[in-house]
Image (cartoon, rainbow, N blue to C red):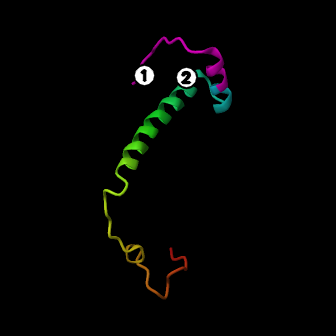
Amino acid sequence: MVKRITANLPTELLEQASKITGKGITETLTEGLMLIRRSQVFAKAEALRGKIHLDIDIDESRERTPETRGRYQP
């Protein structure tokens, strides 16, 4: 679904953003909105830091033994 909008944007800011992304107006605005969403998700994840304790044995989860640790095994 797409929503058509009319917005008053600072010309210089829009030109700079489009130049940075190398994309058109719609694509640049979409990318900016996605960055805002991503930053909110990241902030929520950061808020959980230290509140969740995971007791995971990385070697066991990767099915490694002491003999194979450090060697790539597909």
Q: Position of residue 68 (x, y in %)?
A: 50, 84
What are the residue bounds of the magenta stretch?
1-16
Given this view, does label 1 or label 2 mark the residue nearer the observer?
2
Query: Disc 2 designates what residue?
Result: 26
Q: Nearer the viewer, residue 68 or 12?
A: 12
For image coordinates 63% across by 32% down, the residue present is 21
Report the residue that reaches farthest toward the bottom: 67
Q: Position of residue 72 (x, y in %)?
A: 54, 76
Number of dots carrying numbers: 2
In the picture, measured across the screen, residue 45 lies left or right of residue 26, that is left
Alpha carbons under labels 1 and 2: distance apart = 11 Å
Residue 2 belongs to the span the image colors magenta: yes
Q: Nearer the viewer, residue 20 or 23?
A: 20
For image coordinates 43% across by 35% down, the residue present is 37
Q: Main secondary structure of the magenta part?
A: loop
Determine the image quadrant of residue 11: top right
For image coordinates 43% across by 44% down, the residue present is 42
Q: Quadrant of the N terminus?
A: top left
Q: Is residue 19 above or below residue 8?
A: below
Say the numbered circle drawn on residue 2: 1
